Image: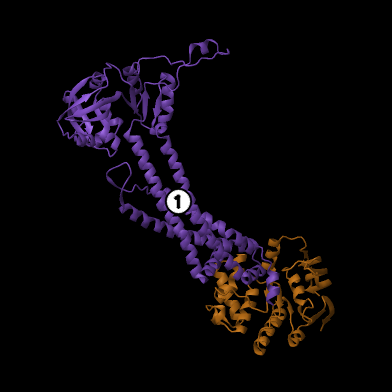
Amino acid sequence: MFWRVSIGIAAAQLSHRRRQTIVSTLGVALGVGFFVATSALMSGSEKDMVQRLVDNAPHITVKDEFRTAAPQPVFAAYPAGAVSLSNTKPREYLRGVKNHGAKVEEVSRQTGVIAASALTGTAIVRYAAKDVSAAIAGIDPEKERFLTTIEEDMRQGSLMRLRTASQGIVIGEGMAARLGLGMDDLATVVSPEGIVRRMKIVGLFRTGNLILDEGQVYMLLKDAQVLLDKPFVANRIRIKIADPDMAEEMAADLESRWGYRTESWQEVNRDFLGLFVVRNVITYSIVGAIMAVAAFGIFNIISTVVIEKRRDIAILMSMGFRGSDIQWVFLVQGVFVGMIGMVMGWMLGLVLLQMLGTVEMTVPGLMDKQKLPLEKGLFQFGVGGLFALVSAVAAAWIPARKASQVRPVDIIRGAT
Amino acid sequence: MSEAIVELRSVTRVLQEVVPVTLVRDIDLTIHRGEFVSVTGPSGSGKSSLLYLLGLLDLPTSGHVLIDGEDTAGFSPDHLADIRLAKLGFVFQFHFLLPEFTVLHNVTLPMLRLGRLGEKEIRERGMSLLADFEIADQAKKRPEQLSGGQRQRVAVARALANDPPLILADEPTGNLDMRNSEIVQGIFARLAAEQGRTVIAVTHDKDFADSAPRNIHLVDGRIESDVKR
């Protein structure tokens, strides 16, 4: 029952200073609202970006290279010896992943894993008097649609037409525009090995990524092997797994077993992922600063009330209220301000999200206009609310404690 | 004489200021159940200080305060608060009602804190206390809407809320006009005579002081005279 008394007293005292209460409540509400909006935007864009990183490219790529050069045999023979070698060249080896077919089969046996061999290289695509240097990817069209999102980005034709057309290629719209090529036109592809082929354009894609759109050429693995003069060779194994978060672990496992440099999407995009941490730190510090200001507002109003209500505190104590009862009265006021601010902040956050949801903008690196990626989760609301309550209670704590330490006799003696 | 309700044993209270001020000096005093005692003395003689010590609002620098035979020396502030809540009722010169609450709510606060009665009973007891002092019709009003005399009666009703055996009053009529002052005086006399409560009232008012069967006169923090009539 006493709870209702302290809440009653708290409510009465706050409603007595309505304007100050509203101002400090608004402070909390602004903090919560902006936190909800910014963190929805931040984590929305983070998720969006990660999704793109995860989907656009294979989760794991096995490359036909080694992370470190093989040690010279002499070091192995005399591990403790004072041996010095200079100007040594690593052993030459035949490029390509050995036994790629068997390796692909082996990893594909695991559930949820899709793997395919690929041969990459460079070539020049020539049409009339123009030529463009291109990255060649010899792929398996059936599996490519699971490995990357290229199939979704097809504007004309399809990857599957590589199977039906002989000597087909799929290029980006950007490259087609530069060369003045269209669907079903024949372009000349020249490899560094000096092999020249007339190849037919059976598909055009547009990913929004300039590097791909103007510089990537897809063809069948078999055609790439011929063009690059590497029969039966593949220099990449590209793998997609069910849970992208396991990629790092699996990559390390494959690398230790096969010896080839094996990159997970996390390793390739380490810089991006590091950036997200920085962004989160920025978000939380800005919101923390807003909340600190709001907390000062709460501290201010409750300190004022405590000073103003010293007489009432004294009389309550002389009646037999304990110091802790008094402390509760003022803590409850802080919680009130925090809770009302939290709810108002949530509403503000919803409004801000609604507004941000209508904004369209061009994301750097992409050509298409996009809606802002927003993550509208309960998480933001929860954390924002927690921020509000914690800062409100912390701000109310100091004046409330002071109120509980009032010695009633000092005040009554002064008043009479 | 019946048993002692409050007892001071060589109580001294010194305010530790730059120059220490002795408020009361070496006081021995016993007050029994049902007594009506007035405390008088010139300004600064320590009569209010004595009352605060009796009411456990202030702690003695040395000596012992016994309430109901229980020595309160060394009690925690919370324990002292609990004793005040259940056994003591204060009335001050200024009514000290909470301005945000209605008259009735003010009176029921100590009962709500004590939590011994249900909510309905608390409200009923509050109303009956107000009725005792003929202010039941003011129950829904706020203190600022009442006259000075009415407010002081509310304060007395609040002091009686938890049915305490001991009422301590500090210049309860100091702020009232003649007529209201007489009404309040009458109330205190009745509390002692009819309800068997112990009333200790500090006052400047000679009439009030003389209406009490026992008068303690303080000078410079010492009891100069303790007269029973």
Residue A264 visible in the shown view: yes
What residue is rendered at 65% in x and 74% in y?
B159
Chain A color in figure: purple
Q: Residue A63: x percent and y percent?
A: 37, 23
Which chain identifier belongs to the orange chain? B
Q: Residue B199 or B221: which is nearer the viewer?
A: B221
Q: Residue A196: x percent and y percent?
A: 20, 21
Q: Quadrant of the N terminus of chain A?
A: bottom right
Label 1: element kind: helix
Disc 1: which chain? Answer: A
Q: Quadrant of the C terminus of chain A?
A: bottom right
Is A50 placed above or below A240 here? below
Question: Which residue in the rendered view is the most extreme toward the bottom?
Answer: B178
Q: Residue A133 or B8: which is nearer the viewer?
A: A133
A108 with respect to A386 (left or right): left
B73 with respect to A8 (left or right): right
Count of numbered tags: 1
Quadrant location of residue A203?
Answer: top left
Label 1, on which residue?
A382
Amino acid found under the numbered disc labelled 1: Gly
Q: Residue A183: x percent and y percent?
A: 15, 33
Quadrant location of residue B63?
Answer: bottom right
State the colouring used for the structure image. Answer: by chain
Residue A2 visible in the shown view: no
Answer few, some or many: residues within 10 Å of disc 1's Cα (few below 14, many 20 plus, some between 14 and 19): some
Is A251 placed above or below A319 here? above
Q: Residue A247 or A372: which is nearer the viewer?
A: A372
Quadrant location of residue A135?
Answer: top left
Q: Residue A93: x percent and y percent?
A: 38, 14
